[in-house]
């Protein structure tokens, strides 16, 4: 039984999201399974910070889909903003973009978002440590470009894991930047499945490799260390633990997790074993709907055609943030929220499931 309260005048529920249109300028095949999409600059110019992401809105097979992709470009160096999209097995949107995006195509996007960022200043003297795996190089490239052009006293040491040379995204760009900025950019490649004549690092990026990287690149204490880590959760946990063991403060280790889909199975604590009603306050109106097992609060709300704000659906961007007024929820992923926001009762609807009765959430 689906409960509904005050679900009237839904057609008058106007979205507060800022949606605008970009036109594809160029596509570049980075690897056999990865393409970069560069867009014409809109008017006014697209305002973004290095390390942020764009959320694209597409209709695929008659259904609206939203996915978030990190900007691979720097607003300080590149004239046109771009994203890089890797094919995923069964990926509805990633495969659609790789197959059908061509110059001239118009794409709806949300404004750039994300907190995987820092401020730049010409007087900064930092040693940036950047650890990336696979497509996690995308926001890292945006940040390191911005460091190189904005901070002449700073240097960047990149440790980058790819499957093979052929599957290394941005390999030529990184080589060109390393040549252009000698002594300021150092790139160390690690291949998990190299060909027989590869002489660099191989295998997983584990604690011994990250330890060796830290000891070699960060012995000069005259530089302030600041780390950016992006890739699979396992790599990020290993990198954080290793860096912390050397006394690197938590606030000096910035991380960005890449998810294909949030895990909602029993191993991650699917608490909604029964259908539970949830009330959402959205733009002054209350909407109550059932959240069945296997669904997040956001997914259940969208199934009821509620115009709830959202973007990445991975618990990172906070577009779906709300304040929990009553009841309890279980958040599968809360990386997008600060400790202060969590203490103030904020939740992410895209990663939250009911954990009790009388749940009421104010969307802000």
Image (cartoon, grey):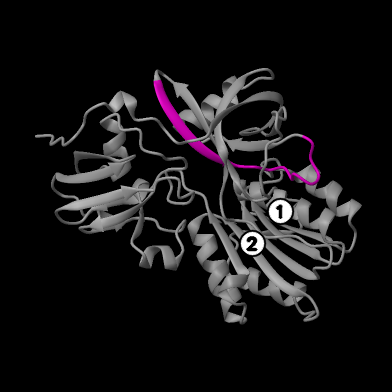
Residue nearer the viewer, 171 or 23: 23
Q: Image check: 320 left or right of 28?
A: left
Q: Describe the element under mark 1 as helix, strand or loop.
A: helix
Query: Residue tagged by mark 2?
Result: 228
Residue 213: give x, y in percent of width and height.
70, 70
**Side of 158 where 108 appears, left or right:** left
Nearest to N terminus: mark 1 or mark 2: 1
Give the magenta range. Answer: 63-79
How far from the left and from the top, in percent, is residue 233?
A: 49, 58
Asked whether 338 or 174 is in front, the reply is: 338
Q: Position of residue 287 (x, y in %)?
A: 22, 38
Label 1 sits on residue: 143
Do the CB atoms of the residues marked 1 and 2 lie less than 8 Å apart? yes
Quadrant holding the N terminus: top left
The answer for how far apart the CA atoms under marks 1 and 2 are is 9 Å
Residue 295 falls in image quadrant: top left
Residue occupying the far left of the picture? 1
């Amino acid at each position: 039984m689906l409960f509904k309260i005050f679900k009237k005048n839904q057609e008058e529920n106007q979205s507060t999201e800022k949606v605008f249109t970009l036109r594809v300028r160029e596509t570049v095949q980075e690897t056999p399974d990865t393409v970069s999409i560069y867009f014409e600059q809109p008017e006014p110019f697209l305002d973004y910070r290095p390390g942020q992401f764009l959320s694209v809105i597409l209709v695929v097979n008659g259904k609206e889909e939203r996915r978030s992709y990190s900007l691979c470009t720097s607003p300080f160096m590149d004239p046109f903003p771009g994203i890089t999209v890797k094919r995923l097995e069964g990926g509805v949107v990633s495969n659609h973009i790789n197959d059908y995006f061509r110059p001239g195509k118009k794409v709806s996007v949300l404004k750039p978002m994300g907190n995987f960022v820092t401020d730049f200043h010409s007087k900064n003297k930092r040693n940036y440590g950047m650890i990336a795996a696979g497509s996690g190089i995308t926001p890292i490239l945006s940040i390191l470009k911005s460091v190189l052009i904005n901070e002449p006293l700073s240097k960047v040491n990149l440790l980058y894991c790819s499957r093979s040379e052929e599957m290394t995204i941005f390999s030529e760009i990184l080589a060109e930047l390393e040549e252009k900025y000698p002594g300021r950019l150092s790139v160390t490649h690690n291949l998990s499945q190299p060909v027989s004549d590869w002489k660099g690092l191989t295998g997983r990026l584990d604690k011994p490799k990250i330890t060796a990287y830290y000891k070699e690149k960060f012995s000069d204490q005259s530089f302030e260390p600041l780390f950016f880590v992006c890739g699979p959760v396992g790599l990020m946990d290993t990198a954080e633990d290793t860096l912390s063991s050397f006394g690197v403060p938590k606030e000096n280790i910035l991380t960005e997790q890449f998810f294909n889909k949030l895990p909602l199975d029993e191993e991650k604590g699917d608490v909604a074993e029964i259908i539970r009603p949830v009330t959402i306050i959205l733009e002054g109106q209350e909407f109550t709907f059932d959240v069945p097992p296997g669904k997040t609060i956001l997914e259940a709300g969208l199934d009821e055609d509620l115009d709830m704000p959202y973007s990445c659906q991975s618990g990172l961007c906070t577009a779906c943030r709300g304040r929990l007024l009553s009841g309890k929820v279980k958040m599968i992923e809360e990386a997008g929220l600060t400790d202060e926001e969590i203490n103030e009762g904020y939740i992410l609807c895209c990663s939250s499931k009911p954990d009790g009765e009388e749940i009421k959430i104010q969307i802000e």
